[in-house]
Image (cartoon, rainbow, N blue to C red):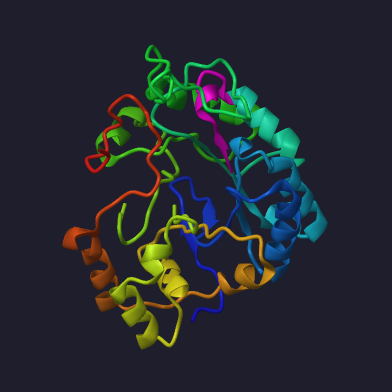
Amino acid sequence: MAASIPKVKLNNGVEIPALGLGTWQSKPEEVTNAVNHALKSGYRHIDCAFAYGNEAQVGEGIKKSGVPRSEIFITTKVWSTYHRRVRESLEESLKNLGTDYVDRASAYALACSAQPQWQPSSFPTLEDGTRDVDKEWHISKTWHNSRSSLKRAKSRQSVFPTAPSSSSTRFSPPQRSPGCNQVELHPYNPQLELAKFCNPLLKDDVVVEIAQKHNSTPVAVLTGYHIAKGHVVLPKSVTPERIESNLKYAELDTSDVEKLDSLAASGKQQRFVKPAWPIVLGFPDWK
């Protein structure tokens, strides 16, 4: 088990803690204490988003912890209905979080929603239930237009969508490349570990075998898998005990990583998060 959290250096020299606290699906009344406890337990990376509906409470938790802002890496995200208004989205997040800047901003999805502004109670959808997409707006515009927004809204890193490798080159001008690409990532889909959906992984024979080998837990193995591959992982919890336990990860060797990498090829390839976008996003496994 590792005693400290390693960091991943991004292409602008900024270092991001490889293990952070995820806040998606955390209730506003719970997330303040969760963030406070996480920071006091040693976390220094908080992942949040305007669309989660709890950024103000995340900001309260950061303030309550007493940890200096300069020691914390904060990630937020631009919701799909704000692709045309990146600066507005970022400024709203800064206001909610009570901070002068965020360390990284990413954009949701490879498509811009047609609805002019996000409604907390629903996603903009068509009559058939699929997402209502602004087909006149290409995600590359979000990326290119974000450059001035980052300076004005004070984000240290790029607004970049969840994108497959086949699409990434379209967003990246030679003089400035995206600092990070946030995606769903786990041994069943080795390309955002989401605790609610990933329970089957915790019972996988290979994962359990590796956990027993290291006298560890399946959760620690999955976290260690990402750390070993140089990924950043964001386990979400509002429970103090789990927040603390998620700081512990198994230090895997090459054979462990190879076994986990082989799970997808053995017939277990799958995504757990697949919004009903009515367009082709470019991921070969998205069907």
Instruction: Write down the quadrant of residue 240 in the picture.
Output: bottom right
Position of residue 112 relative to residue 216, above or below, is: above
Judge whether residue 84 is colored magenta. yes
Is 2 on the left or on the right of 61, as rendered?
left
The residue depicted at 46 percent of the width and 74 percent of the height is: 220
Answer with the quarter of the image where residue 269 lies. Answer: bottom left
Q: Is residue 222 left or right of residue 7?
A: left
Image x and y of residue 286, in percent = 27, 40
The answer to whether residue 162 is seen in the rendering is: yes
Residue located farthest toward the left when viewing the structure as drawn: 266
Residue 19 placement, left or right of 42: left
Q: Nearer the viewer, residue 17 or 225?
A: 225
The location of residue 29, given as percent across then percent down, is: 75, 50
Side (left or right) of 32 relative to 256: right
Whether residue 278 is situated above or below residue 190 in the rendered picture: above
Determine whether 157 is above or below 63 in the image. Answer: above
Task: Tell me, yes or no, whether the highlighted magenta stretch contains residue 39.
Answer: no
State whether residue 99 appears in this view.
Answer: no
Q: Residue at x 28, y 68 (%)?
A: 260
- Residue 127 percent location from the top left of the image: 42, 18
Residue at point 40%, 36% (across, down):
275
Q: Residue at x 50, y 61 (%)?
A: 18
Identify which residue, 189 or 278, lies in the foreground.
Answer: 278
Answer with the quarter of the image where residue 285 lies: top left
* Number of residue marks: 0
As drawn, 234 above or below 110? below
Residue 52: x percent and y percent?
A: 61, 40
- Look at the image and give the residue range highlighted in magenta: 76-86
